[in-house]
Amino acid sequence: MARYHEPVCRLCRREGMKLFLKGERCFKEKCAVERRSYAPGQHGKRRNKMQPYGLQLREKQKVRRVYGVLEAQFRRYFAEAARQRGVTGDNLLRLLELRLDNVVYSLGFASSRSQARQLIRHGHVLVNGRRNDIPSFQVKPGMEVALKDKLRANAFVNEALDTAQGRGVPPWLELDGENYKGKVLALPTREDIRLPIQEQLVVELYSR
């Protein structure tokens, strides 16, 4: 499975904001954006005015990096969103939110989406009682997502779950923290997605 292997803090610095790719580190003073709030590289401190294409490209890269998908996969998501009824930008974000790795992260079973993908790939996640090791699996309303019993004593999982209960779970999900499981109540709406994303710029980029 293709994946990004370089330092992820560079991605946050490049986008000029926290993308919360490192879990707990993003909330501490060691966060790279807090220490060096400029783009990486020798020309990172230059602040050139961006043209419309540059703004669209940066927004697309931001969305890709938040959800941890590569370019070819992201294009497939956009094509599927364009085929569906409704607003293309809203459809795109809905498809990304319904990825299994994002649901595991949103429920609080992992401190980041990359950690959620690792749990899924290692076979620790159950969907409707059956093991599912596909991070991109599209969950649907009514499905139950749970962790295997042996992970209930895992320190990383419990720490992530405590943090998630403090920040809250999206309204389209229901968390049963005591039993380490959650349920998809409905499809997420645009109002449920609290990320600072301007999806219309992504639509404009692929519509050029």
Image (cartoon, helix red, strand yellow):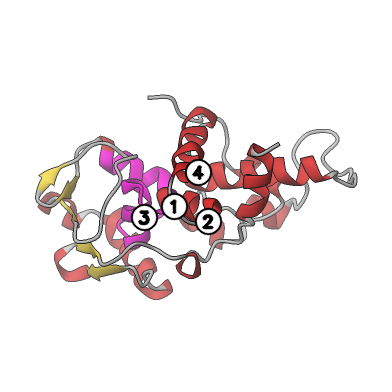
Q: Earlier in the sequence, mark 3 or mark 1?
A: 1
In the picture shown, does residue 109 fall above or below 59? below
Q: Earlier in the sequence, mark 2 or mark 4?
A: 4
Assign a secondary structure to mark 4: helix
Q: Can the viewer see residue 207 in this picture? A: yes
Name the residue nearer the viewer: 193 or 85: 85
Task: Please name the amino acid that badge 3 sits on.
Answer: Tyr
- Say which mark, if any, is on residue 82: 4
> How much space separates mark 2 and mark 3, taking CA atoms?
25 Å
In the picture shown, does residue 33 fall above or below 165? above
Residue that numbered label 3 is attached to:
105
- Say which mark, if any, is on residue 87: 2
Q: Quadrant of residue 187?
A: bottom left
Task: Please name the amino acid that badge 4 sits on.
Answer: Ala
Crowding around mark 4 (Cα neighbors within 10 Å: few <14, some 14 to 19, many 20+) is some
Task: Assess whether mark 2 and mark 1 are in contact (beta carbons under 8 angstroms).
Answer: no
Dominant SS in magenta:
helix
Q: Quadrant of the N terminus?
A: top left
> Residues in magenta?
96-120
Assign a secondary structure to mark 1: loop
Q: Tell me residue 19's x, y (percent).
A: 57, 53
Q: Tell me residue 48's x, y (percent).
A: 90, 44
Task: Please name the amino acid that badge 2 sits on.
Answer: Val
Q: Quadrant of the C terminus?
A: top right
Residue that numbered label 1 is attached to:
85
Q: Residue at horizontal 62%, vertical 60%?
A: 29
